[in-house]
Amino acid sequence: MGNDTYKGYRGAGLAVLEKHGVSVWSDVDVVTTNGPFKGLILPRSETADELHVVLKLNNGYNVGLAANTILSMKETGRREVIYKIPEREFPRDPRKPKVKLFGTGGTIASRLDYRTGAVVPAFSPGELYGSVPELADICNLETEKLYGVFSENMGPEQYIRTAQKIGEEIGKGTDGIVIGHGTDTMHHTAAILSFMVQGSPIPIVMVGSQRSSDRPSSDAASNLINAVRTAAEGDIAEVMVCMFGPTSDEYALLHRGTRVRKMHSSYRSTFRTIGDVPLAMVDNKTGVTHLRHDFSPRRKDRRVKINTAFEDKVTILYYYPNMLPDIVDACVDNGYRGIVIAGTGLGHVNKPLYPALKKAVEKGVHVYMTVQTLWGYVQMYVYETGRELMELGIVPAANMLPEVAFMKLCWTLGQTDDRDEVKRIMLTPVNGETTDREPYNGYLVYQGAVPEVQEFLRSIKR
């Protein structure tokens, strides 16, 4: 047997495969202490645990079987693995717009090889055409992998280079830009790019997927098609996040980069515009449908302002009851220049923090207050606590989301340390990070089980 016979398996997982004479890519009938299973044995990552065997079930989902629960495994067939997706030449049409797809890590798209169960990554135009041929109906696509990192490892090095590459691509005459990105920190990157790339004449669309292409409920292809359509045909020239709108695949939503947040760990419709409404809907039938009209429109010129200033020594402190002052002291002692606080209510923290916060401000640390409720505004003049905090030098940041305030403070302190100028930049909206008011429908959180919500849910498609 070849090197892929037990790919990724070791310990108890390897032992149970060897005991029953099966291997990776075997179709098997399995009997366990928890009942019978039928499926395909998938390879495992080298960093995965050694205690489970992973099966792809006939319904397309994967399941991990604890090795110590497996009573028998019978091979019923084998499949030939194909790890590379077949390439097809991406059709070029001079009448279609040019879109550039930047990759930041992971797979932008992938295809499930149904004979093997393998998820085959796709990134080059030819691979993407083989995986998502609908893209050729929309544009002339070019791709460039900037780097390969998980989204939690994104940082200033990646932010700065991405902004610079966007500027270069705009200068080349590209009609739209798509950035493939992991979903976990996509809203952070969308925020910083909204500050680093100002006045873009073309759409800049960030996209990812919540569920991989080996799952029947994958959103990868749909999100990518909608993002490319937005970049190619849309007239909103801003940094946006394009992801599933409802839980179904009827349409995607375009969220402004400074007002969007990931709100669920696994839902496909995880991204929400907070304290406002999305910019638009996009689907395969009607294209981009505006939900609001106060956006920056697409232009024919190639002018854009790229400002990649960034200060590393900034942090977010999420306030909690009985937070001790040594946390603030530690930030000051370690040279942090900026602190964003996600405070309770209208922007509050406890009194024991006051001396530490006063010391921080006196030592030149810039401290800004946001609200951990996410929706709503900091209003520190209402209660005594808020007024006292402002007297210490803490600046309320209106309805800026904590992560957005963090990114903006990093960007601002990369440009200046002058207290008045920092305040001016922080409180002057660049692209909707603060708004004059929250629309009546900018806050909608439904609570399941209550009669009126259940009635509403029954009236819509699920």
Image (cartoon, rainbow, N blue to C red):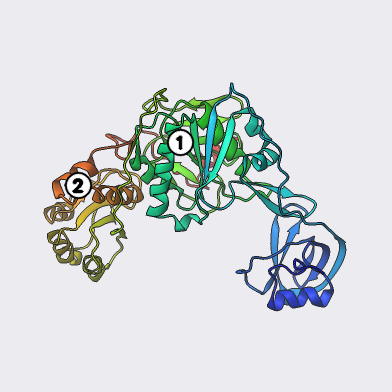
- Residue 257 appears left or right of 141: left
Q: Which amino acid does label 1 sit on?
A: Glu
Taking depth in this image into account, of 144 and 31 the one nearest to the observer is 144
Which image quarter: residue 294? top left
Percent position of residue 141, x then y: 58, 34
- Residue 281 appears left or right of 193: right
Looking at the image, which residue is at 45% across and 42% down?
A: 272
> Which quadrant is home to the N terminus?
bottom right
How packed mark 2 is, by other alpha carbons closer than 10 Å (few <14, some 14-19, many 20 or more), is some
Q: Do we see residue 139 in this rendering?
A: yes
Q: Name the residue under label 2.
A: 422
Front of the two marks 1 and 2: 1
Percent position of residue 318, x then y: 32, 59
Q: What element carries label 1?
A: helix
Q: Earlier in the sequence, mark 1 or mark 2?
A: 1
Q: What element carries label 2?
A: helix
> Which quadrant is home to the C terminus?
top right
Q: What residue type is labelled 2?
A: Val
Give the Cα separation between the discs numbered 1 and 2.
Answer: 30 Å
Q: Name the residue under label 1.
A: 169
Q: Do we see residue 188 in this rendering?
A: no
Q: How many marks?
A: 2
- Residue 294 appears left or right of 113: left
